[in-house]
Image: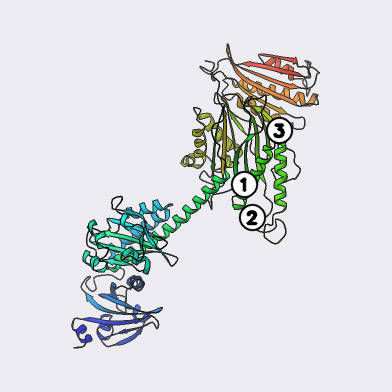
Amino acid sequence: MRTEDVLAAIATGLWRWDNASGIVSLDAEAARLLGLPAEPVRLSEAAVRSRFHPVDWNEIDGVVSLAVAEGTLAEARLRIMDDQGRVIRTVRSRSKPLIEGSDYQLVGTLQEVADPQPGTAGPHTPITGDWRRSREAFLLDAGRALAEARSTAEVLRVAASLSMPGFSPDGLAVFGMSGERLTVIGHHGQQDGDEGPFTSMSLDTDYPAAEVVRTGRALYLPSPEEYRRRFPTTWPLAEPFERQSWAFVPLVVAGRTMGAWMAAFKHPVTFTPDERSVLTTVARMLAQALARAGVAESERELSLGLQRTMMPVLGPGIPGIQVAARYVPTGGGLQVGGDWYDMIRLPGGTGGGAGRIALVIGDVQGHDVRAAGLMGQLRIALRAYASEGHRPDAVLSRASRFLYGVNDGYDGDGDGRPGTGAPGGGPRFATCLYLEVDLETGTVDIARAGHPDPAVRMVDGTVLLRPTAGGLPLGIDADTDYPTTRLTLEPGETLMICTDGLLETGGHDLDSGWERVRRLLEAHRGDDLEELADTLVEAVHGPGSHHTTGPLADRREDDIAVLLLSRRPATTVREAPRRTLMTIAQAEPERIAEAREQVRQLLHDWTDEDQLDAAVLMVSEMVTNVLVHTDGDALLTAEVACGDKGRRLRVEVSDASDELPHKRHPGEMASSGRGLVLMEMLADAWGVAPRGEGKTIWFELTEPAGPEGCCA
């Protein structure tokens, strides 16, 4: 009896689909099952497609593609439609691909099934709708979770937590390759150490994962008997795990097999086309997630390596001081940029004491590889100039000239002309703050090149931003002067210098960002600088930044560098005075506003607001008087100390003129002459003291009722 007759007797149709020509050949029974006259026929793919429910056609298209890729059987249920779009029957299709080069033919059978009953399912009802919906929801969730994984460990945790609809594996393993050997990247559902025999296995080994990696084709082993028959050599390795079914699926990225994924089951699994489709889809997503994680980890490793080579090791503790630093790159790319910090031991010292160090912090324009390269060159140049013994102003002047020369010779687009055209081309400038610290006396000489000012946290927690004279950023002008500002860091005080990323991250400007940082510095308790450095960074770059003010609190647009230095406190730090000192030059009358702000910050917790306003007014009058009536600069010194009756503010303004001020009685319309009158009215005490060359005008205010325990 012919095969066709046997198939007809059991109501099974035979069909052949030629992929190259797009022609489908049907025997009489297959034609009948498709709702056509019961006679052999050759139809176009489009004509056959019109007989199937469109949802089911998309389903079988995926199943066939999977079968062709794996060389396995394609099986699916399909709803047959009549010309009015009604479901007339449901058939089961089984087919086998015959591959010839890039073309293939499918030879298969059609057989009617009784589920669902003809006419009972609407045109939009999927035959396995519940399972299909749960599968689609699972794949969406799995894809989202794998896409969010940022490391290999996270990818493996996600893979281990996947609960597949109806056939979840209890054992997983991910295999990779190292040369010609199989490696175990991770596993789940086995004891630690169980992976031993499978690590460093040759790809020539008769083991399913090795064969999958060699061939790029999935293997499905539905029973222990099938495993033992196919892989008798390595079956003893798998037998102790007492599994019933195994799927080994290739991990393929961009056409390259990078490993294999094993899903093992305690219960028997037949691996239907739907189940194989789910496993294959998960394997593709898993492969892509592992590839992304591998690239990200390589970038992080390269980034950390670059950071380690470019950032200094602060080294062992220096007697008398504590130092802490942090660098956090921006979120994209290789995570390297132009921010840096440095600490340099300087030659010599003052008075044979503990010596001097230089602190440097800076920011080269940009967040790319060129910025990192320029930063490395500039850091080396600054170290060289500092080690030669130059003063802060000379160090920055030479560094600016160096960067200007580098910019002048840079060929930004490779056309032979310096710095033209190309993205990232052209000159780059850098901001920088250079501080020379005398470790014995605490004096700090500062030169600033367009960089944010330093801040000082005093012993009682008061924080002052210390305005400093400055010049242009480095690299803009070959001949730029950088004036020097001096301040004194008292025992127990902490100096903070940072790049603008610490201030402006999160949508803040320099002013609002500084207020945020100031609150953090004032709230810190204890003398652990490492903890303080972490607090500063986490507040603007960690989870805490999501809850702070700012229009874009989650933005990560700039690198962050911060450096903290503290002089070790004296035996009694509670009564140590607050002190600030600044110079207002004749050519800088705008710094009078900075002097007023310094006094306000110094008196941030003064209980009498009227006294605070009076102090600010008197400081403004005293400094203005020096700039208007003398030819020299004004030196402002302000100190808050504990006295017998509470806290006392003393402010001194010194100048080089020997002419003493005289009290006058200005009329209502007079524009000057009120300074001493105001002091007489507002100050608790005031006076004028000759000081050799020059004089000092001073006043004092005593707080009527200071904070409880402030002078304890």
**In what element is the residue under mark 2?**
loop
> Crowdedness of circle 2 by 10 Å Cα count: few (<14), some, many (20+)?
some
Quarter of the image that includes the N terminus: bottom left
Mark 1, mark 3: which one is toward the viewer? 1
Per the model, the C-alpha gap separating discs 2 and 1 is: 17 Å
Q: Name the residue under label 2.
A: 424
Tell me where residue 29 sits by quadrant: bottom left
Q: Mark 3 points at which residue?
A: 484
Residue 71 higher or lower than 312, as above or below: below
Q: Seen in the image, is 634 located left or right of residue 598?
A: right
Of callouts 2 and 1, which one flags the residue occurring earlier in the amino acid sequence? 1
* Amino acid on which the number 1 mark rests in the picture: Gly
Between 683 and 594, the one nearer to me in the picture: 594
Residue drawn at (81%, 18%) of the image: 659
Residue drawn at (70%, 50%) of the image: 406
Residue 130 higher or lower than 660, as above or below: below
**In what element is the residue under mark 1?**
helix
Q: Seen in the image, is 316 located left or right of residue 193?
A: right
- Can you give x and y, in whole percent of width and height, for residue 106 in the image? 33, 79
Q: Mark 1 points at which residue?
A: 376
Per the model, the C-alpha gap separating discs 1 and 3 is: 25 Å
